[in-house]
Amino acid sequence: MASTNSGLSERRAAAVPVGVGSSTTIHADRAQGAELWDVEGRRYVDFAAGIAVVNVGHRHPRIMAAVEAQMQRFTHTSFQVAPYESYIELAERLNALAFVEGPAKSIFFTTGAEATENAVKIARAATGRPAVIAFTGGFHGRTLLASAMTGKVNPYKTQFGPMPGDIYHVPFPARDVSVEDSLRALDLMFAADIDPSRVAAIIIEPVQGEGGFRVSPFALLKGLRERCDQHGILLVADEVQSGFARTGRLFGIEHSGVKPDLIAVAKALGGGFPLSGVVGRASVMDAVRPGGLGGTYGGSPLACVAALAVLDVINEEKLVDRAHQIGERISSRIRTWSGRDDLIPVGQPHGLGAMTGFDILETSGGTVKKGGASAVCAKAADLGLIVLSCGVHGETVRLLPPLTISDALLDEGLGLLEKALQA
């Protein structure tokens, strides 16, 4: 008997704990490019890209060929047992592309949370300091330290007991909080809560992902860089969601001109294969003693060859430029929706490049509607479009189509989203 979405939902409920949520009830059967088919044979336009993972599209031929060739040689040795060239070559490629000051080095892991946590380990080793400063609305993963750095309690900290100590949060500039407010809060923190000489790192997303696709103002990033230089603190850019051409630059922080000391990467790097890493200034990266970093599956040979193919595709298919084109097309369409009385009230587009979102509002030009994005995303799925929500209050619809998507398919998806917004 063929599988159905409802049948698999029942099996899931009996076999999988409720702690792992899913945005849709769609159960994937196959995918190609910017399209996905469920187990019942229904086709969907994919504006989620596996949460910004398949920036080069599902099953890109270059990636599939690279992985298939690697599978004929070996699938695993552990880099810590018998290292291999693809890991080294990928590090060389990223070091050459790294938006940091001076020579760079790279190390690889498996998940985004591993990347952010290891960035903290490296920063603590390099500075000899314990504390980390993050921002409200930021998301850095679901492991315990990553959850502590994440600037949202529910659902990431609720139920999980005491969080690791020496983690502090500064208000992120959004709505009624200005850049000046954020920097003033940081300075007050240094005066009232923690001596800056105890702070190892400040971690920030160039574009907040779960926080609602809010761009970190360039003035804020410059202010952070100045304070980091003044106090010997390392600046960590969390590029897990914003990296690898998504924003119209290889790394989202490049838009600001501010160079971080460490960059946490994951998601799109592996093109669908689990891979993350930390790229940073060589002198900082070398602070950890041998054996202090690593992981059995870190830098999987399959993922490394996939990542090398991803970098080739980004370069050869000019996906940095394509991200700008996609973002402009999306933003232009969203602007036409704002103020229409036949649609649910929406705000103006925000984000960078093809990392664009918009808020669902209570009334036209009014305040955001808490939880308002989920209903729109559910309706879109019923119409044949996969799109995700985010935002501190669940108010933002985020659009993350593969950067290889055609204009025709992009317009089809935007048309479906417009239908989902009909009042």
Image: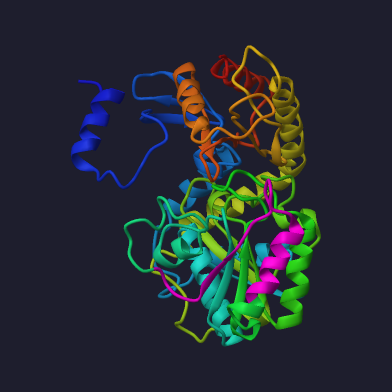
Q: In which quarter of the image is the C terminus?
A: top right
Residue 80: % across, % down: 43, 75
Note whether residue 85 is visible. no
Q: Is residue 254 left or right of residue 152?
A: right
The residue shown at (57%, 57%) is: 136
Q: Nearer the viewer, residue 378 or 192?
A: 192
The residue furthest top is 342
The residue shown at (62%, 25%) is: 363
Q: Is residue 23 magenta?
A: no
The residue shown at (40%, 65%) is: 144
Q: Nearer the viewer, residue 319 or 335?
A: 335
Q: In which quarter of the image is the N terminus?
A: top left
Note whether residue 26 is visible. yes
The residue shown at (80%, 59%) is: 219
Asked if 198 appears above or below 298 in the picture, the reply is below
Q: Quadrant of residue 45?
A: top right
Residue 122: % across, % down: 55, 77
Q: Is residue 166 magenta?
A: yes
Q: Which of 124 and 96 is in front in this view?
A: 124
Residue 249: % across, % down: 74, 50
Asked if 259 appears above or below 17 in the picture, the reply is below
Asked if 343 appears above or below 26 in the picture, the reply is above
Q: How many marks?
A: 0
Residue 407: % across, % down: 70, 24
Segment tinted magenta in the rendering: 163-189
Look at the image and name its color scheme: rainbow
Q: Is residue 242 left or right of residue 96?
A: left
